Image (cartoon, rainbow, N blue to C red):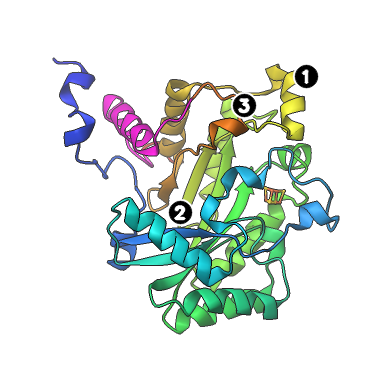
């Protein structure tokens, strides 16, 4: 029999085999091709101002994730600049979602949140909001407001930084909340019918491969609609850079091949209805010395699909 590589089509002719894992698609969810516009709403983070802690999570440097077009502009001006950015790259879309990504985008009084979100929704090409936040930055009033926007016809999704399901890890990375807080926020949000995405980092210090497989089992118990997995990137100048330099043996360092293998193992244990939004991230080269280089997300997706085909397995195959 031909090797699996010979049996898989090259990237340029490749048709994604979405039955191997549940790949997130706005077209499938809403019947529209939607593009997210990353915005900076000017919010801050409680883990930096002393509320639960100072200094932030040890892996975090938000500057590594800010597109240049967001800087120093109003929400509407960022949206215009973002649309221009995507149009120039020829990206076809039926509309845009305002993605409040920087810092914790529910960490402000409700009146401030309303001003920002409603400014975004006033743009004629904006179909809805994606709100990235910490699980300790929501309450019943804020969630009810988001649900009311959804009831009014806007698409509204909430994305929580879960990062790890293990309190030991959350403490070590100075996260400032525990996993019980995450569980509560995810459940309360889902109860209102708002789609919930979780953001998880693979390879945080002290976590083993076995723990990450157990993590998949624990995530299955939450009413999550989708997940974003990211490999741990050690960003220059962060406390984690120092920690890694002092104790590299505490980190599961993986090249792309080992990472794809781990993801395949995790997906096998994950509920098949949880859609996978991302499997990795990359920050500009100036922020990290990662040996991964600038690998395109589509290339990694292709490698993952090939790996699942080679193993003749799929998402949920080994779910307990
Ligand atoms: S990762 Fe999020 S919660 Fe942690 S310091 Fe950065 S902005 Fe704050």
Residue that label 1 marks: 246
> Mark 3 or mark 1, which is nearer to you?
1
Residue that label 3 marks: 208
CB of mark 3 within 8 Å of CB of mark 2? no
Decide: is 27 above or below 89: below
Q: Earlier in the sequence, mark 2 or mark 1?
A: 2
Image coords of residue 80 (percent x, y): 45, 66
Q: How many marks?
A: 3
Which of the 4 image quadrants contains residue 14?
A: top left
Residue that label 2 marks: 226
Task: Determine the secondary structure under disc 3.
Answer: loop
Mark pair 3, 1: CA separation = 18 Å
Between 61 and 169, the one nearer to me in the picture: 61
CB of mark 2 within 8 Å of CB of mark 1? no
The structure residue drawn at horizontal position 45% and vertical position 60%, both measured from the top left corner, is 82
Q: Earlier in the sequence, mark 3 or mark 1?
A: 3
Question: How would you rate the neighbour count of disc 1 (Cα within 10 Å): few for under 14, some for 14-19, many for 20 or more?
Answer: few
> Mark 3 or mark 2, which is nearer to you?
2
Q: Is residue 163 left or right of residue 220?
A: right
The structure residue drawn at horizontal position 60% and vertical position 42%, both measured from the top left corner, is 64
Decide: is 3 above or below 38: above
Q: Is residue 302 magenta?
A: yes
Q: Which contiguous range is marked in magenta?
A: 293-316
Q: Is residue 121 left or right of residue 114?
A: left
Decide: is 34 above or below 293: below
Q: Name the image quarter holding the N terminus.
A: top left
């Amino acid at each position: 029999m031909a090797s699996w590589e010979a049996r898989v089509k090259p990237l340029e002719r490749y048709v994604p085999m979405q039955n191997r894992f549940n790949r997130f698609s706005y077209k499938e969810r809403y019947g529209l091709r939607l593009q997210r516009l990353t915005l900076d709403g000017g919010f801050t983070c409680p883990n930096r101002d002393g509320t639960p802690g100072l200094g932030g999570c040890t892996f975090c440097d938000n500057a590594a994730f800010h597109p240049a077009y967001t800087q120093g502009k109003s929400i509407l001006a960022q949206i215009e600049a973002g649309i221009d950015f995507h149009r120039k790259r020829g990206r076809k879309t039926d509309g845009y979602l305002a993605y409040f990504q920087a810092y914790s985008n529910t960490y402000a009084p409700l009146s401030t949140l309303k001003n920002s979100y409603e400014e975004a929704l006033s743009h004629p090409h904006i179909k809805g909001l994606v709100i990235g936040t910490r699980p300790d930055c929501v309450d019943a009033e804020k969630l009810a407001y988001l649900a009311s926007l959804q009831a009014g016809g806007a698409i509204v999704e909430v994305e929580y930084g879960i990062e790890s399901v293990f309190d030991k890890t959350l403490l070590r990375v100075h996260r400032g909340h525990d996993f019980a807080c995450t569980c509560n926020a995810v459940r309360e949000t889902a109860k209102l019918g708002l789609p919930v995405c979780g953001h998880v980092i693979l390879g945080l210090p002290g976590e083993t491969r076995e723990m990450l497989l157990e993590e998949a089992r624990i995530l299955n118990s939450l009413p999550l609609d989708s997940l974003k997995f990211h490999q741990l990137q050690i960003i220059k100048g962060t406390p984690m850079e120092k920690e890694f330099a002092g104790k590299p043996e505490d980190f599961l360092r993986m090249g792309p091949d080992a990472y794809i293998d781990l993801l395949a193992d995790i997906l096998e244990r994950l509920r098949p209805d949880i859609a996978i939004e991302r499997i990795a991230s990359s920050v500009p080269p100036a922020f990290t010395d990662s040996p991964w280089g600038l690998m395109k997300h589509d290339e990694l997706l292709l490698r993952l699909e090939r790996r699942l085909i080679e193993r003749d397995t799929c998402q949920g195959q080994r779910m307990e």
